[in-house]
Image: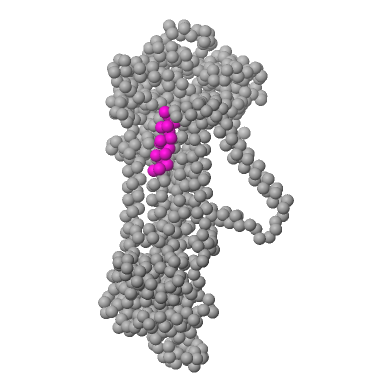
Amino acid sequence: MKKRMVAGVLSMGMTLSLLFTGCGGGPGESENGSRELLNVSYDPTREFYVTYNELFSEYWKEKTGEEIRITQSHGGSGSQARSVIEGNEADVVTLALAHDIMAIEDAGLIENGWMEELEKNSAPYTSTIVFLVRKGNEKGIQDWDDLVKEGVEVITPNPKTSGGACWNFLAAWAYEQKQNGGDEEATKAFMKKLYENVLVLDSGARGATNTFVENRQGDVLIAWENEAYLSMEQYPGEYEMVTPSISILAEPSVAVVDSNAKEHGTEELAKAYLEYLYSADAQRLAGENYYRPSDEEIQKEFSQQFNFDMELVTMDDFGGWKEAYDTYFDDGGVFDQIYDCKNNE
Amino acid sequence: MYVEMRHVNKTFDGFHASRDVSFAIKKGHMAALLGPSGSGKTTILRMIAGLDQPDSGDILIDEVRVNDLRASKRGIGFVFQNYALFRYMTVADNIAFGLEVQKKSKAEIKARVEELLELISMKELGKRYPHQLSGGQRQRVAFARALAPRPQILLLDEPFAAIDAKVRQELRTWLKEMIGRVGITSIFVTHDQEEAMEIADRIILINQGKVEQIGTPAEICSCPETEFAADFIDARRFEALMSMK
Amino acid sequence: MAKKKERTYEKDVIGDGIHSIRKVIEPPKEPSNHRMKYALIGMSALFLILMLVLPLIVVISNALRDGWNTYVGAILDEYTIKALKLTVAATLCAVVVNTIFGIFASYLLSKFYFRGRQLLATLIDIPFSISPVIAGLLFILTFGNVGWMGEFLKSNGIKIVFAVPGVILATIFVTLPFVFRELFPVMNSQGKDEEEAAALMGAGGFTIFRKITFPHIKWALMYGVILCTARAMGEFGAVSVISGHLRGKTITLPLHVEILYNEFHTTAAFAVSSLLVILAVLILIARNIVEWKRK
């Protein structure tokens, strides 16, 4: 008799816990019934999208009269892409590199041809990779070859999880390839040395910035240009930016996650959200947040701020993201080779 | 016959606790289940109470088969080896518990509790908690608690095991007298032959789950039927006991 | 006449690792080596100051670095309030579910003997030994889109991972053993005689629980609930993995602290941390009251 009671209440407890867990709603609609948009983004865009979301909400309300709510999510670009694949119901993704969006496309959540859907390869703003050093630049860091010197401690995130880290890697690679005239083995040796100098390998760009800026680890941070500017703004007079002779044109891509948007009934909203990134107001906002506007006219307004004379290689020089990722970052790729070697020593 | 077991068998995880146990006890008698420790005495007691179920065989109370009757419906009072007093209840609440469960009226419960406290000469101690009592007092409370709902049968599991040797004798006499006064059929488990001889009308000698012999103390002593009975019972001590009486 | 407060040896014998530390309160019988004693006291004090007191002071002083108004502003921020609400909700769910679960599991395991009893006890302990991050990943692999139950959940419109249910589920998971751990030894030491005695007198299961079992486990239960609350509020790893970092939706206080910190709002991060510290201190006080009452 007691046993039966125990079994009964045990199952009651389980039902109760299911009830508890079943009561949360997903994105798509919020508590007051207004539509909701989930933007899953990468690490350093936090500040930019906070202001852009306000801008867009106002614009959308003026245009349609509809109040919308926009939820943000930030983390390492690669991990963010994975979370979308695993069920994080993003309506739009604004990630650090095209490859991460391709991964979502491969999972069947984004339709083919997303890159052509918006202007400029679906990259409404660009950036590049620079160095951030502490005031005075004690180690005299000017270019990539200064990073492999003995005793220089480098902070950069892990390319396996961070988009920014991939750009960092490729920029360094492009520099050394050019220096030694395309000798791949020599470049690998250079990269190995560079990563031997890495003190902390964070999982996202913002984590790396924090390690360098707030926890004061390392001599140099290989950073997004926007991240470097932001750090200097947050800690005025404490940091200096160094632009290397060669860097890379980083194109953070954006796309509508078609299957989620369809399910939430937010397709046209999501599309409008991304298209509005190309408007003059939004482009200016991007510039103010230290992203390079892709609109040439607006670019001119920021000619004081950005060094447009830097030599920038593009992804085309690497044969596009698919090829580049397979070569350098996939399991067993160049990064694994050089980082494994380091561990084996 | 009042309490009867017919060919009862019981195993626990392959251990044979009862083998073809059969015996009967008359109404108003006081029987002792006597045997060395681990011989299966307590199991028999628990099966009569309904706390354990026999694998086969029948248990009868007042000519009715009770195998499928719930423990609480068998009209049994049980005194556990360590008394199992409800430690978060006062003595009075302990005694009242069985009556409350039966939804008796407040007045009736109060009267019965007082009557029993009187019986066990603990009238002043009704508000105490079990941990504030001596071992002998606890045993008396356990006895009163078992009697409170007016059971037909009283079962006692090693009622003196947890008590100082000094007061054991005294309590034994007390218990025998009490049971006699209440006039209830009772069965108690013991491993102490002296105890069994002194209190019981009937001894059921148990060894390795089997009934070795049933009889009055004198019968068991004077003519042991099995080798075990002869071995286990120390006749000289019995004689000494008898002469004391 | 001795009253209720009288201590008896019976109540002090609990005998598992967690509780035996309470015996420290008893003064040692023999005079001890004084130099040794003071050296040890000094070391412990130094360690505690370094590892515990100092960081706490840092948290509080940093939180108030930019003045009281900034502090209040950070705490009354919309996202902080939302994070606080979710934290409270998740904690409540975890406490309710784990209390119910803990009571029944320890009742089952201490009063009944059945095959697989040991296995069940071990299973309940898994959340203790498994890293919370792994726990979060397990949930994603089970309930996520590419997961084992993903198809089924999606077709039925049930969202678990990257949503509030996931956060709650993860919190429940990591705090699962707490109440059980506290209750089991107490219930086990009680034995089942008292319950059997009550059942024999005709008491039903609920009456037995209310009158016999519950008074015995009351303080252990409270203690377990408090530990469970503390752990649930502070949970980071599992929740971080399963939350998807949706601001204002799946962010609990610890996650919110991380976000604030990552966004260079250091002061706000410390302010919100201080909120967690305050809650923790309240829990500590409650815990000590319970410990004292239990004696």
**Does residue A2 appear in this view?**
yes
| A220 with respect to B198 (left or right) | right
Along the viewing direction, whichever of B132 and B228 lies nearer the viewer: B132
- Residue B200 in percent (x, y) is at 41, 84
- Asked whether residue C79 is drawn in magenta, I would say yes
**Is C217 placed above or below B44 here?**
above
Residue B220 sits in which quadrant? bottom left
Q: In which quadrant is the N terminus of chain B drawn?
A: bottom left
Residue B204 sits in which quadrant? bottom left
Along the viewing direction, whichever of A43 and A184 lies nearer the viewer: A43
**Does residue B210 appear in this view?**
no
- Residue A97 in percent (x, y) is at 44, 22
- Residue C136 in percent (x, y) is at 44, 39
Type of secondary structure dominating the magenta stretch:
helix
Residue C211 sits in which quadrant? bottom left
Give the extent of the magenta segment: C78-93
> What residue sits 30% from the left and 77% below the top?
B61
| C203 with respect to C291 (left or right) | left
Residue lying farthest to the right in this orientation: C35
Q: How many marks?
A: 0
Along the viewing direction, whichever of B37 and A20 lies nearer the viewer: A20
> What residue sits 46% from the left and 83% below the top?
B173
Colour option used: one colour
> What residue sits 35% from the left and 60% below the top?
C207
- Asked whether residue C51 is drawn in magenta, I would say no
Residue lying farthest to the left in this orientation: B64
- Residue B75 in percent (x, y) is at 31, 73
Along the viewing direction, whichever of A190 and B92 lies nearer the viewer: B92
